[in-house]
């Protein structure tokens, strides 16, 4: 009978499982931290929104249009914060195992926040006469929408180009718990993905940089360099 | 990009299995009782060295010369060169060497080309020694190797004793990475040897008991890796194979990727084919640790290499390939992207599971590298930092790539020649 190192198999197995469990707990602890982080950021962002809403109400009530510019800056900043947290949340949600529910609730909050900002943006445009263009972007998962990845890439690029003059709000059409999503999709006849809604006009299927550029430029009062270029073409 | 739960499960299994093996062999290292002891060599037995040579006109003289320098009684040393139907000048060169060194018992046998296994059997049939040594023509021995090896045949059951094999004068990065690989591999095989788990007796200067290999029927003549096959056969008959770390033998390593690929494709493919041939030993308690851990390792190590390398390539490169592809749709306007780039980093964004795995693997690799070097009396930085870094971070990709190639060969049923 040949030698069998039974004891070594047991010890090695136990240590391996120990390290695995340690990693598992570490993972769960980090997941918990991620939920806490998003929760606290979101609380702060809700506060920011209330404040912003109040600032516009104040301008409206007392006809303080000279303050529009400063408040507009805050608006832009808030929206950027919102977007970066939303993307981070999407990433966390993708990797999540046990805290999926908490993260989905947070995702829901971000959908509402986006809609709130969009509506606020619409109202302030009338109030302050800002030169902005709105895009609503409806996306789905990779299986249903293989083109969403490049559409998001193009939109991110345009946002970087136009900064505060272009507002993009992204909506996960797969997110069912929030009734606002089907409501929006019904309003704009979204049946295919990706669909982008530029100033209320839906365009379904992947749209490249130039075609979006051409369309949004037609809305701007003050044409930027890129707009002049694309119109000349 | 979401990683499906099945892929995650496979990745974790691969990782935990590697971790398990690493811990297991670490426990073997810690356990001093498993170390075997040598006895004193009282008399010098007759030893036959067989050199199978096929078109080796470039290397054979160095190999023969190293044998003549062995510290061993000339009348107890029988050297047999089996010319396996060389089409080059091997035959004449060896004949000339014999006439110049007539103090030595050197013989040349010529036969038609039938492969290494058949050449070894031809040598085995005529060898008179108590011990039989196979020596590849691309290898050379240090002068005290034999004196150091023979005392380790402590009992009748010890069938093979293996020397410390190193890469001869590594010149470029490929050979230097292999130099490190051999050092690590030798240390690993030394650990295996403690549990009698060695599964291959490589061509350069493996010393066999002649009567044992004659009894089990000599070498397999139709095998990709006859050295691995005979070791598995010996293990299946419960013989002992001992790996040493002090008798040094040098071998010439492939110096380009193409040569390396060809060599390893044959080695690894041979190991898989032969492992399946001896699958009755797999997970079989009758064969002790060899059945339980070593036989599965031969198969699993290839699978792990394929899984790790392909997932690393897929998940590591896919985002970049995608971003590059997506850039088509913004007319490659990287300037805007760079100009507006904002560094938005949060500690919570990091993938801690991946970091934990990489750190543990890196620490284990560095510890193994250090220990292997101290055990084989080499300096860690002998061939420079570049080769160390390339070995740690690049070489496993090369090996993984070779395994992927083998998988494809098997999948598409490619025929293999020696």
Image: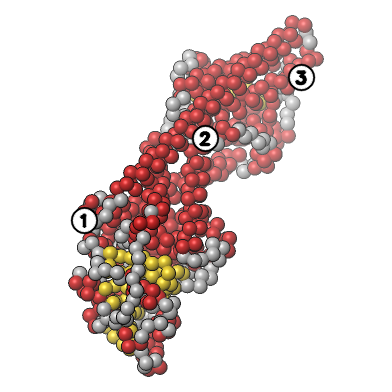
Q: Going from the N terminus, do you reach mark 3 or mark 1 first?
A: 1
User: For this view, does B33 lie left or right of residue B233?
Assistant: right
Q: Quadrant of the C terminus of chain B?
A: bottom left
Rendered residue at 43%/48% (across/down): B308
Rendered residue at 40%/55% (across/down): B29
Q: Position of residue B257 (x, y in %)?
A: 47, 64
Q: Position of residue B242 (x, y in %)?
A: 33, 65
User: For this view, does A124 lie left or right of residue B81?
Assistant: right
The chain holding disc 3 is A
The chain holding disc 1 is A
Foreground residue among A137 and A200: A137
Of the two numbered discs 3 and 1 in the rendering, the one whose residue sits closer to the viewer: 1
Q: CA distance from mark 3 to mark 1?
A: 86 Å
The local crowd at label 3, few if under 14, some if 14 to 19, many if 20 or more residues have their Cα within 10 Å, is few
- In the rendered structure, find residue B167 and report the number of the disc placed on it: none
- In the rendered structure, find residue A149 and report the number of the disc placed on it: 2
Residue B130 appears in which quarter of the rendering? Answer: bottom left
Q: Which residue is mark 3?
A: A70
Is disc 1 in the same subunit as disc 2? Answer: yes
Q: Is B310 drawn above or below residue A86 in the view shown?
A: below
The local crowd at label 2, few if under 14, some if 14 to 19, many if 20 or more residues have their Cα within 10 Å, is some
Residue most extreme to the top = A61
The local crowd at label 1, few if under 14, some if 14 to 19, many if 20 or more residues have their Cα within 10 Å, is few
Q: CA distance from mark 1 to mark 2?
A: 61 Å
């Amino acid at each position: 009978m040949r030698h069998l190192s039974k004891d070594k198999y047991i010890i090695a197995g136990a240590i391996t499982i120990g390290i695995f469990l340690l990693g598992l707990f570490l993972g769960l602890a980090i997941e918990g931290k991620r939920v806490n982080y998003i929760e606290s950021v979101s609380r702060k962002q809700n506060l920011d929104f209330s404040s912003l809403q109040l600032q516009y109400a104040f301008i409206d009530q007392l006809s303080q249009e000279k303050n529009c510019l400063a408040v507009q800056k805050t608006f832009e900043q808030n929206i950027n914060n919102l977007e970066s947290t939303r993307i981070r949340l999407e990433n966390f949600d993708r990797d999540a195992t046990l805290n999926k529910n908490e993260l989905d609730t947070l995702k829901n909050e971000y959908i509402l926040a986006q809609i709130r900002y969009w509506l606020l943006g619409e109202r302030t445009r009338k109030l302050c006469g800002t030169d902005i263009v709105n895009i609503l972007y409806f996306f789905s998962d990779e299986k249903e929408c293989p083109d969403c990845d490049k559409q998001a890439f193009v939109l991110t690029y345009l946002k970087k180009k136009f900064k505060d003059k272009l507002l993009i709000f992204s909506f996960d059409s797969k997110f069912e718990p929030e009734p606002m999503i089907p409501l929006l999709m019904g309003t704009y006849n979204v049946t295919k993905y990706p669909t982008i809604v530029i100033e209320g006009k839906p365009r379904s299927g992947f749209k490249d940089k130039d075609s979006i550029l051409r369309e949004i430029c037609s809305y701007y009062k003050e044409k930027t360099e890129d707009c002049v270029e694309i119109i000349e073409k | 990009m979401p990683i499906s739960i099945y892929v995650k499960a496979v990745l974790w299994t691969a990782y935990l299995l590697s971790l398990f093996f690493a811990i297991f062999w670490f426990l073997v290292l810690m356990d001093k009782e498993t170390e075997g002891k040598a006895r004193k060599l009282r008399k010098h037995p007759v030893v036959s060295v067989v050199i199978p040579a096929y078109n080796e006109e470039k290397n054979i003289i160095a190999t023969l010369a190293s044998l003549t320098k062995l510290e061993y009684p000339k009348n107890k040393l029988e050297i047999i060169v089996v010319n396996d139907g060389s089409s080059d000048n091997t035959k004449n060169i060896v004949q000339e060497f014999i006439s110049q060194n007539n103090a030595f018992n050197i013989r040349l046998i010529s036969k038609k080309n039938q492969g290494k296994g058949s050449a070894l059997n031809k040598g085995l049939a005529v060898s008179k020694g108590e011990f039989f040594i196979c020596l590849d023509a691309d290898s050379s021995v240090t002068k005290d190797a034999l004196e150091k090896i023979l005392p380790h045949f402590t009992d009748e059951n010890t069938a093979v004793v293996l020397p410390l094999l190193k890469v001869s004068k590594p010149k470029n990065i490929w050979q230097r990475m292999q130099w490190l690989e051999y050092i690590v591999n030798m240390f690993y095989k030394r650990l295996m040897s403690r549990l009698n788990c060695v599964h291959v007796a490589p061509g350069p200067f493996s010393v066999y008991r002649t009567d044992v290999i004659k009894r089990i029927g000599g070498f397999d003549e139709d095998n990709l890796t006859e050295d691995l096959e005979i070791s598995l056969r010996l293990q299946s008959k419960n013989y002992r194979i001992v790996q040493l770390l002090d008798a040094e033998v040098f071998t010439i390593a492939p110096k380009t990727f193409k040569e390396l690929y060809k060599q390893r494709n044959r080695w690894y493919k041979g190991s898989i084919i032969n492992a399946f041939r001896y699958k009755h030993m797999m997970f079989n308690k009758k064969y002790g640790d060899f059945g339980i851990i070593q036989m599965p390792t031969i198969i699993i190590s290839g699978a792990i290499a394929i899984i790790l390398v392909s997932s690393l390539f897929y998940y590591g490169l896919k985002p970049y390939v995608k971003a590059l592809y997506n850039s088509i749709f913004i007319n490659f306007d990287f300037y805007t992207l760079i100009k507006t780039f904002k560094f938005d980093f949060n500690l919570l964004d990091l993938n801690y599971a991946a970091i934990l795995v990489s750190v543990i693997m890196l620490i284990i690799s560095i510890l193994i590298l250090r220990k292997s070097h101290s055990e084989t009396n080499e300096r860690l930085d002998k061939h420079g930092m570049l080769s160390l870094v390339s070995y740690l971070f690049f070489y496993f990709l090369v090996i993984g790539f070779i395994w992927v190639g083998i998988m494809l060969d098997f999948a598409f049923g490619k025929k293999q020649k020696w």
